[in-house]
């Protein structure tokens, strides 16, 4: 969707062959950068326990409390798993993500973590329970980073596409915490999904004239020029999935584009896109143009 929108805003005659797939790959890289940096930030907050211990112990007259800073979280299993991943390190180095770190912000977020009851319970428990190791890292992300206006501003300042990807990052990071062993930092999107994205992108561009012929008559009193550009793109994508992607059920297509319209367009867009796509689908079914197959059958 973002790539198609970018293509629509380009001046005619400036688009070269391969531009669409290059833009798509660029956007996927941007998403990977943000994902990598978010996990890096979680790890850095956990690691700050060691920095805090060193700073407080080096005071001229350290108190007993200064000398007893608990550094358990710095050795958290999830932190070690992330930092020890070769793909993760390649991403940090190739995109120079370490230079984005705001150490003062990390310190403040760490201090906020230290004051929380869940952290106090975590360090009070002896040994390392796998579930608790995961729980405290999830807490850092969901309750410290996601709810910090300062951190969100930092992300917005550091990544121009943060606003587009923020909601998706919650899903991606959540999936990582659930099954970290399944993630490949060098290929965040599976080959199957990447091929699907490229195929859908090129199909929408290739079939644009035809899909608009199907969409425009359904707009009735709506002026196509005044309809939100994102809504038009989502409808074009939906029609293409109806016609040219036989393994995707029509109900899944409609629900997906309703959600995208709600997330990225106007408050009324979900209902609008739903109505138009449903109307078009009825005509296509009547004309026997919808041919769907079970993706599980070989």
Image (cartoon, helix red, strand yellow):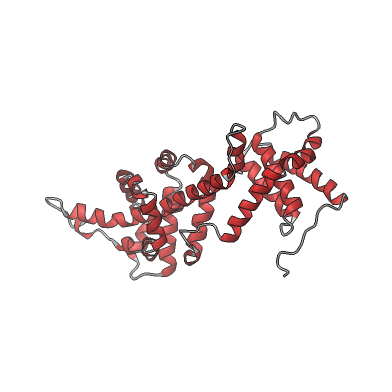
Quarter occupied by residue 171:
bottom right
Q: How many marks?
A: 0
Left or right of 69: which side holds 18? right
Residue 163 % position (x, y): 51, 41
Image quarter where the C terminus lies is bottom right
Image quarter where the N terminus lies is top right
In the image as oriented, which residue stretches furthest toward the left? 60
Left or right of 262: which side holds 87? left
Residue drawn 63% across the image and 55% down it: 196
Residue drawn 18% across the image and 55% down it: 57
Q: Against 97, is 149 above or below?
A: above
Q: Against 230, is 22 above or below?
A: below
Residue drawn 69% across the image and 28% down it: 226
Residue 209 % position (x, y): 74, 39
Quarter occupied by residue 252:
bottom right
Left or right of 109: which side holds 248? right
Residue 266 % position (x, y): 64, 35
Work out whether residue 184 or residue 277 is closer to the camera in this orientation and state it.
184
Work out whether residue 251 or residue 125 is closer to the camera in this orientation and state it.
251
């Amino acid at each position: 969707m973002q790539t198609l929108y970018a293509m629509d805003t380009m001046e005619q005659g400036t688009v070269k062959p391969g531009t669409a797939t290059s833009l798509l790959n660029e956007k996927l890289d941007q998403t990977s950068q943000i994902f990598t940096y978010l996990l890096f930030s979680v790890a850095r907050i956990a690691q700050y326990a060691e920095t805090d211990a060193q700073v407080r112990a080096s005071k001229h007259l350290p108190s007993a409390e200064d000398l007893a800073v608990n550094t358990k979280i710095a050795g958290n299993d999830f932190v070690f798993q992330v930092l020890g991943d070769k793909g993760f390190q390649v991403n940090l180095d190739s995109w120079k993500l370490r230079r984005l770190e705001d150490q003062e912000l990390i310190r403040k977020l760490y201090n906020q973590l230290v004051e929380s009851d869940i952290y106090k319970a975590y360090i009070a428990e002896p040994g390392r329970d796998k579930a608790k190791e995961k729980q405290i890292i999830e807490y850092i992300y969901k309750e410290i980073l996601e709810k910090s206006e300062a951190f969100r501003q930092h992300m917005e300042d550091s990544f121009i596409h943060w606003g587009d990807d923020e909601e998706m990052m919650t899903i991606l990071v959540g999936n990582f915490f659930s099954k970290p062993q399944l993630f490949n930092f060098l290929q965040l999107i599976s080959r199957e999904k990447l091929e699907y994205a490229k195929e859908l992108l090129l199909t929408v561009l290739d079939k644009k004239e035809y899909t608009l012929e199907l969409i425009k008559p359904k707009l009735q009193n709506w002026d196509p020029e005044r309809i939100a550009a994102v809504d038009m793109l989502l409808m074009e994508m939906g029609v293409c999935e109806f016609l040219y992607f036989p393994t995707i059920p029509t109900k899944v297509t409609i629900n997906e584009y309703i959600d995208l319209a709600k997330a990225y367009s106007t408050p009324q867009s979900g209902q609008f896109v739903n109505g138009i796509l449903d109307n078009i689908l009825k005509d296509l079914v009547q004309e026997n143009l919808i041919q769907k197959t079970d993706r599980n059958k070989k």
